[in-house]
Image (tube, grey):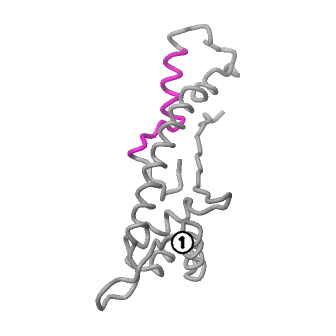
Amino acid sequence: MAEKTLRMRVKFWIEVDGENAFGMGSFALLQGVETTGSLAGAAKEIGMSYRTAWGRIRKIEERMGQPVLVKRGGNKSGYQLSAFGARCLASYKAAYAAVHTVAQREFDHRFASLLADQPDKTGDDEAGDEAGDEAGQDETTQQAGGQAAADYSPRSGQN
């Protein structure tokens, strides 16, 4: 039988007066504008239509009460993040990493050994062997996705 792997998934978003204002999609969109210098480029990068992307930007700005994008200055076309948009992006990224770190620690503590504690189907259960249990927990914790927050990008959508 193939070995099973447990993984933790975490999603969170920011609400204003009970309405979604900023989440993973907004983060990816603003990060794309930051790297591509255009809303169209950012939308294409994340597989979103320009119309949907523009609607999302309007929704963020309406709910947050401040612009997150400004037109690029000079003769350049496109958009760049406003100071508020840059703060939103940085704050969400930092909060996401912190939430993931805490959630990963809790997952490792509470769930990582869950599959290791199951009796072996062949009858060779070593559940009573403390050394075996500890070694199994360490191995399972690593297999269960003990991924460091530093290696973790909210943009990837993978926890």
Residue at horizontal 32%, vertical 88%?
Answer: 76
Labels in figure, total: 1
Q: Is residue 87 left or right of residue 57?
A: left
The percent position of residue 119, horizontal first and vertical second, equals 68, 19
Amino acid residing under circle 1: Glu
Instruction: Name the residue beneath numbered marker 1.
Output: 61
Foreground pick, 83 / 129: 83
- Within the magenta stretch, is there residue 112? no
Name the chief secondary structure element in magenta: helix
Q: Quadrant of residue 20?
A: bottom right
Which quarter of the image is occupied by the N terminus? Answer: top right
Q: Is residue 136 above or below residue 99?
A: above
Q: Is residue 34 above or below residue 148?
A: below
Secondary element under disc 1, as helix, strand or loop, is helix
Q: What segment is highlighted magenta in the picture?
A: 133-150
The percent position of residue 100, horizontal first and vertical second, equals 50, 43
Foreground pick, 58 / 43: 58
- Within the magenta stretch, is there residue 143? yes
The percent position of residue 39, horizontal first and vertical second, equals 46, 79
Foreground pick, 40 / 26: 26
Q: Crowdedness of circle 1 by 10 Å Cα count: few (<14), some, many (20+)?
A: some
Q: Quadrant of residue 85?
A: bottom left
Q: Is residue 77 above or below residue 11?
A: below
Residue at horizontal 44%, vertical 55%?
Answer: 91
Residue at horizontal 58%, vertical 41%?
Answer: 8
